[in-house]
Image (cartoon, rainbow, N blue to C red):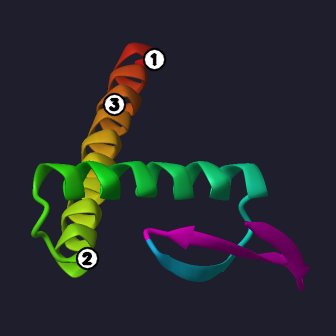
């Protein structure tokens, strides 16, 4: 895993499962390593729970869970913002 600059963006190379990927973004190497680790941990967990699951199905399940968690966090944040707004009135 390594990162290098590309016009204010970084190219980050990592292994997810058994495949090499290159991601481009502004996040730090530490952030990208953490994301890679979480993805690999979740992928390994799914593979251990269901040995016959395809890589594609595992990726869809991981993505679905990530979007679901993001939606839950956004709803929590919106509720906190509304609560703070109501308390200011």
Can you give x and y, in whole percent of width and height, for residue 22 in the image? 64, 82
Q: Is residue 38 magenta?
A: no
Which residue position is annotated with label 3?
Answer: 82
Q: Nearer the viewer, residue 31 or 45?
A: 45
Whether the magenta-drawn stretch holds residue 7 is answered as yes
Q: Nearer the viewer, mark 1 or mark 3?
A: 3
Residue most extreme to the top: 87
What is the secondary structure assignment of the residue under circle 2? helix
Pick the residue in front: 46 or 75. Answer: 46
Depth check, mark 3 against mark 2: the one in front is 2
- The residue lying at 10 percent from left, 57 percent from top is 50
Q: Which mark is residue 55?
A: 2
Name the residue at 20% across, 51% down.
48
The Cα atoms of the two marked residues, 3 and 2, are separated by 40 Å
Q: Which residue is mark 1?
A: 88
User: How many residues crowd around disc 1 within 10 Å: few (fewer than 14), some, or many (20 or more)?
Assistant: few
- Which residues fall within the magenta stretch? 1-17
Taking the image as shown, residue 65 lies to the left or right of residue 19, namely: left
Answer whether residue 8 is visible to the viewer in this image: no
Number of callouts: 3
**Numbered disc 1: secondary structure:** helix
For image coordinates 57% across by 70% down, the residue present is 15
Q: Is residue 73 above or below residue 7?
A: above
Q: Earlier in the sequence, mark 2 or mark 1?
A: 2
């Amino acid at each position: 895993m390594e990162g290098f600059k590309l016009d204010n963006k970084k190219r980050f190379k990592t292994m997810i499962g058994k495949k090499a990927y290159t991601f481009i973004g502004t996040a730090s190497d530490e952030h990208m390593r953490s994301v890679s680790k979480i993805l690999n941990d979740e992928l390994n967990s799914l593979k251990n729970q269901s040995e016959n699951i395809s890589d594609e199905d595992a990726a869809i399940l991981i993505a679905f869970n990530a979007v679901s968690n993001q939606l839950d966090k956004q709803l929590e944040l919106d509720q906190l913002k509304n609560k703070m707004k109501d308390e200011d009135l």
